[in-house]
Image (cartoon, rainbow, N blue to C red):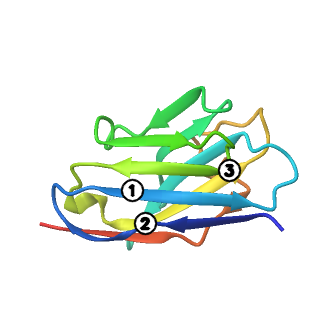
Amino acid sequence: QEQLVESGGGSVQAGWSLTLSCEASGFTDSINCMGWFRQAPGKEREGVAGIWDRGGTTYYADSVKGRFTVSQDNAKTTVYLQMNSLKPEDTAMYHCAADLRTWVDCTKVNEYTYWGQGTQVTVSS
């Protein structure tokens, strides 16, 4: 059974760094899109970063460009989100998502089929 498991969240002070990991298992076909999304209380889920085309393409929301870096391991089963210079507004539940299809828009939250349970990131000022 397909599964995505996130880890690495925590509570930090503004300016600190965290690295989130998402391990994919149970997939019988190659994953195309892998993305990170976040949802703060009372807000809609939003895209943060993504990686697809076997790591050849990356995407970042404007709010995290220059601070966050998305990457994959060589086996393409684990995706990482390095988050530097964290701000209080980065506080949210961070979810990893994956999709196998090669023709979807990997920047869109509603294109993803598989989702992890999420890991909480809390940034205090």
Q: Which residue is mark 3?
A: 77
- In the rendered image, residue 105, in percent from the top left (x then y), is placed at 66, 36
Question: Residue 30: x, y in percent?
Answer: 80, 43
Residue 100 circle label: none
* Residue under the image location 24 percent in, 55 percent down: 86
Find the distance from the CA under tag 3 to the CA under tag 1.
16 Å
Q: Which residue is labeled 2 in the image?
A: 8
**Sequence-wise first label, 3 or 1:** 1
* Residue 23 higher or lower than 29, as above or below: below
At a point 77% along the width and 32% down the height, the residue shown is 103
Which quadrant is home to the N terminus?
Answer: bottom right
Amino acid type at circle 1 is Thr
**Neighbour tally class for label 3: few under 14, some 14-19, many 20 plus, Cα within 10 Å:** some
Q: Assess whether mark 1 and mark 3 are in contact (beta carbons under 8 angstroms).
A: no
Q: Quadrant of residue 40?
A: bottom left
User: Which circle's residue, 2 or 3, is located before the other in the chain?
Assistant: 2
